[in-house]
Every structure is written in C-alpha cells, then in structure tokens.
Image (cartoon, rainbow, N blue to C red):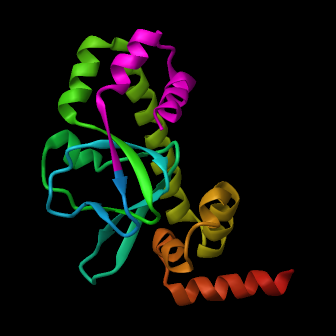
Amino acid sequence: MYQLLCDHIEQHVHLTEAELSGFTTLFELKNVSKKQILLKAGEVCRFEGFVTKGMFRVYHIDKNAAEQILYFAIENWWITDIDSFTNERPSQLFIEAIEDSEVLLISKKNKEFAYANLPKIEKLFRVMTQKTHVALQRRMIDNLGKTADQRYAEFIERYPQLFRRLSNLQIAAYLGISHEFLSKIRNKIAHKK
C-alpha cells in the first residue's frame, strides 16, 4: 500500500530514502467498506487521501436531492474536499467508498509538517494541484460546450478503468444527466454498431 504512494511520489519529485520514509510515516491507513461514508456534508474535512485500493466517489446533493458527482478516485488517485480541508470550513461534499477500499490519509497538521521539513513535498502538492486545476477546467469546458453524447463517449475513452467499475446511475450523475437519458445515449450508440 505504501509502495503505491512511493511510486506515485517518484513520478513527480525525487526523494531520498530518508525523505520518503519520513513522509510516508505521516499517513494513516484506513480500510473503508463499500458504501461507507468517509466525509459527510456539514463536517470539516480533516484529511487528504491517497487511494491504494478500491474506488470512491466525491459528490454533492443539490437542492432537489439529486446527486452530482464531482469525481471518482481509484487506485493512485487523491481524494479530499480541498475547500473544507484548506479553509477548515464545513464541507458541502460527501466522500463515499464505491468498493471495499484502502486509503492513506494525511492530516493538515502532518501536511504542514511535511511542507516545513521536506521542501520537495511542497513541489509535489503544487504539481498535483496544477493537474487537478487542468482536469477541472477541461471538465467545465466540456460541460459547457459538448453534448451529453460527446461527454459520454469521451468519458469511456478517457477513463476505461472507471467505466467498467461504475453503474449507469453513477456515470449519469457524473455527466449531469438522468439515468434515462444515459440509457437513450447507450441505445443510440448500440444501434450505430
């Protein structure tokens, strides 16, 4: 489990064995059962998590009680409510395990300790933040400028490892469409083949 985190870190910054060992000790392993909530709306998010096994969904429930999935996180991906974590304010999000999962959690205190004592870690999180911003910007542009059919086709192409592990309801909630509309898109694609 820690090896996956070490490999991930090495893709972005090079740490000595001592630095790597010191950083990984700042994480706590948590086993999360399928459907278990890791964060509820209204709570302050006290962690950033690195997924080592399984899958999570990060979602919001709108005023009409509809789920809006912001993103999924599988092995080698990070999860958090960055607003709540950074600003120590109540979250508007839920983080739930879709599968039995394992996640390595780092607290804000431990992250700040890493920043102060391992300067390369600040670079690691800066690079990850930039990648997250790029992904969110692309998603916003796609949602504004592409049809649901196009977004669905791109989701399948971009995230085949997710597509096979998700229900149609979860994919529809991510795309911001109804389950029924997703079924129509899938039928249309099936008839084209």
**Is residue 122 in view?**
no
Q: Quadrant of residue 38?
A: bottom left
* Residue at figure coordinates x 49%, y 56% from the top left: 54
Tally of marks:
0
**Image position, residue 144 (x, y; %):** 50, 64
Question: Is residue 14 located in the magenta-colored stretch of the structure?
Answer: yes
Q: Is residue 170 above or below residue 71?
A: below
Q: Is residue 153 above or below residue 161?
A: below
**Image position, residue 65 (x, y; %):** 28, 82
**In front here: 47 or 157?**
47
Is residue 34 left or right of 14 when viewed as pictured? left
Q: Quadrant of residue 182?
A: bottom right
Quarter holding the C terminus? bottom right
Dominant secondary structure of the magenta stretch? helix
* Residue at figure coordinates x 36%, y 57% from the top left: 32
**Image position, residue 101 (x, y; %):** 44, 56
Q: Is residue 29 above or below residue 148?
A: above
Question: Is residue 109 located in the magenta-colored stretch of the structure?
Answer: no
**Is residue 131 in view?**
yes
- Furthest toward the right, the residue is 193
**In front here: 157 or 149?**
157
Is residue 136 left or right of 93 when viewed as pictured? right
Which portion, as a residue range, is magenta? 1-30
**In front here: 144 or 54?**
54
* Residue at figure coordinates x 59%, y 66% from the top left: 165
* Residue at figure coordinates x 22%, y 28% from the top left: 110
**Image position, residue 80 (x, y; %):** 32, 48
